[in-house]
Amino acid sequence: TQLLEQSPQFLSIQEGENLTVYCNSSSVFSSLQWYRQEPGEGPVLLVTVVTGGEVKKLKRLTFQFGDARKDSSLHITAAQPGDTGLYLCAGVGSGTYKYIFGTGTRLKVLA
Amino acid sequence: KAGVTQTPRYLIKTRGQQVTLSCSPISGHRSVSWYQQTPGQGLQFLFEYFSETQRNKGNFPGRFSGRQFSNSRSEMNVSTLELGDSALYLCASSLGNSRETEAFFGQGTRLTVV
């Protein structure tokens, strides 16, 4: 069974701090997506990484796909209260079209 | 273009009743997946439909079923509702023709069983 483990599970930081969220698996994924979800809403796609070693930047967010395509990280620089939410990584399982979601990281940024 | 639309947004049902939720995918998308999200269990995969056929299935009891129509719209049905079925039900649509395809979510249906 393919699993995506995220760490940390919870994170509470002050505005202006930096943070990194990790998404790890023992399996290879052809691509990984990162989503952010706010309470009562559906997850919103932030980015897709496809190539091993790929780095993508979205304003203050930096996403990296591991060289072996088994892990990914999300780094936020100078976090703001608007970054608060549940961050989920997801990938398509090997041999299926089924999305596998990570366990989630709940981030709270305090003003 | 229009996003994924789920109806209704909120629903309150009584134990033992049944419920049908609807999902209209993004135009041109042929795959619709359904998920149950609860605080304790996170996002759990229910099933995926592609071109009117169930292509993948999660580990949920037979009370949970779904279908997809020729226009790619999908419905999910839960029969004999239990208190534990209270959750946010999300659907996601994608092109579904590649293992690198991205999924786009609706806002979800919040089901409360009392």
Image (cartoon, rainbow, N blue to C red):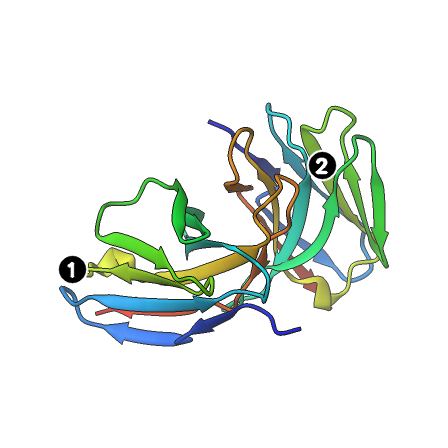
x and y percentages locating residue A110 in the rendered image: 70, 64
Mark 2 falls within which chain?
A
Q: Is residue B65 above or below residue B2?
A: above
Q: Is residue B58 above or below residue B69?
A: above
Q: Is residue A99 left or right of residue B52?
A: right
The tag on residue A72 is 2
Viewer-proximal residue, A49 or A104? Answer: A49
Q: Is residue B42 visible?
A: no
The tag on residue B80 is 1
Q: Is residue B55 above or below residue A36?
A: above
Residue at the limit of the structure toward the front, as seen here: B70
Residue at image x 13%, y 64%? B16
Which of the 4 image quarters holds residue A84?
Answer: bottom right
Q: Residues within 10 Å of mark 2 (few under 14, many from 20)?
A: many
Q: Secondary structure at mark 2?
A: strand
Which of the 4 image quarters holds residue A9?
Answer: top right
Q: Is residue A42 left or right of residue B73?
A: right
x and y percentages locating residue A39 in the rendered image: 53, 66
Q: Secondary structure at mark 1?
A: loop
Q: Quadrant of the C terminus of chain A?
A: bottom right
Q: Is residue B83 left or right of residue A6?
A: left
Which of the 4 image quarters holds residue A82?
Answer: bottom right
Residue at image x 78%, y 59%? A79
x and y percentages locating residue B69 in the rendered image: 39, 62
Mark 1 falls within which chain?
B
x and y percentages locating residue B59 in the rendered image: 33, 40
Viewer-proximal residue, B28 or A64? Answer: B28
Q: Is residue A72 left or right of residue A87?
A: right
Q: Is residue B43 above or below residue B14?
A: above
